[in-house]
Amino acid sequence: MKNNKRRSFSLGYILLFFAIVYLAQMFFSPKAEEVSYSQFRLYLKNGYISECTVGQNIIRGYYKKLSAEGGEEDKIAFFTVPIQDQALVNELEEQKVRFKGAPENNFLKSMIMWWIIPFGVMTLVWFLLLKKFSGMGSPFMSFGKAKVKLYSDNGTQKITFADVAGCDEAKKKIKGN
């Protein structure tokens, strides 16, 4: 006896996928130290900031710190939340810090916009097409199916050689064999 259990797609698979993506992002993204905005301004004034990226909601960058052995400088990643400060760009230029602006990168927003919505639309269109064309007698996806109908009169009508019009010599030749 065959086991006809049908496996269904579960919401658990989707949750597992998002958990794996979240953990991968958490473990593989670079670790950065959070500094206050005033500490960032102090590092900038003293020339410790080597480079930074200024975004609308966050400033990320690297500051120089003397290593324990002395002499060598370590680059330490940092981030801070910016305050509306028009003089920041001028001060970055004065300290000769490489800086750039950055657009906001929201992981959830980009995931929804570029992955979930397009696949959702494609899936919806696919199911609507299948529903529309899967009715009886629909030619969609029915290639290879025979369209032969068998009409039977239960043997009441017999055709003989006398009923068939045609050449008498052919009839004799067939009867003779």
Image: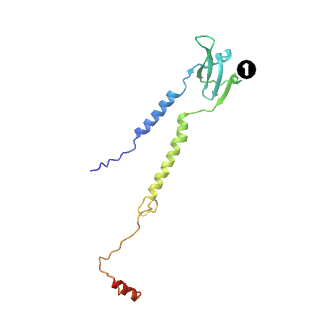
Residue 58 at what x, y percent from top left? 60, 26
Report whether 82 appears left or right of 135. right
Quadrant of residue 38 in the image?
A: top right
Residue 167 at what x, y percent from top left? 41, 87
> Is 55 located above or below residue 147 in the figure?
above
The furthest residue to the bottom:
168
Nearer to us in this view, 55 or 177: 177
Amino acid under disc 1: Glu
Residue at 62% in and 14% down: 72
The structure's colour scheme is rainbow
The furthest residue to the left:
1
The furthest residue to the front:
177
Which residue lies under the disc numbered 1? 94
Quadrant of residue 17 in the image?
A: top left
Count all numbered tags in the image, as a single digit. 1
Residue at 55% in and 41% down: 114
> Is 7 located above or below residue 52 in the figure?
below
Residue at 67% in and 28% down: 100
Quadrant of residue 42 in the image?
A: top right
Crowding around mark 1 (Cα neighbors within 10 Å: few <14, some 14 to 19, many 20+) is few
Residue 149 at what x, y percent from top left? 38, 70
Callout 1 secondary element:
helix
Nearer to us in this view, 119 or 67: 67
Residue 146 at what x, y percent from top left? 40, 66
> Is 159 located above or below residue 120 in the figure?
below
Report whether 147 appears left or right of 79. left
Residue at 59% in and 13% down: 67
Q: In what quadrant of the picture does the C terminus appear?
A: bottom left
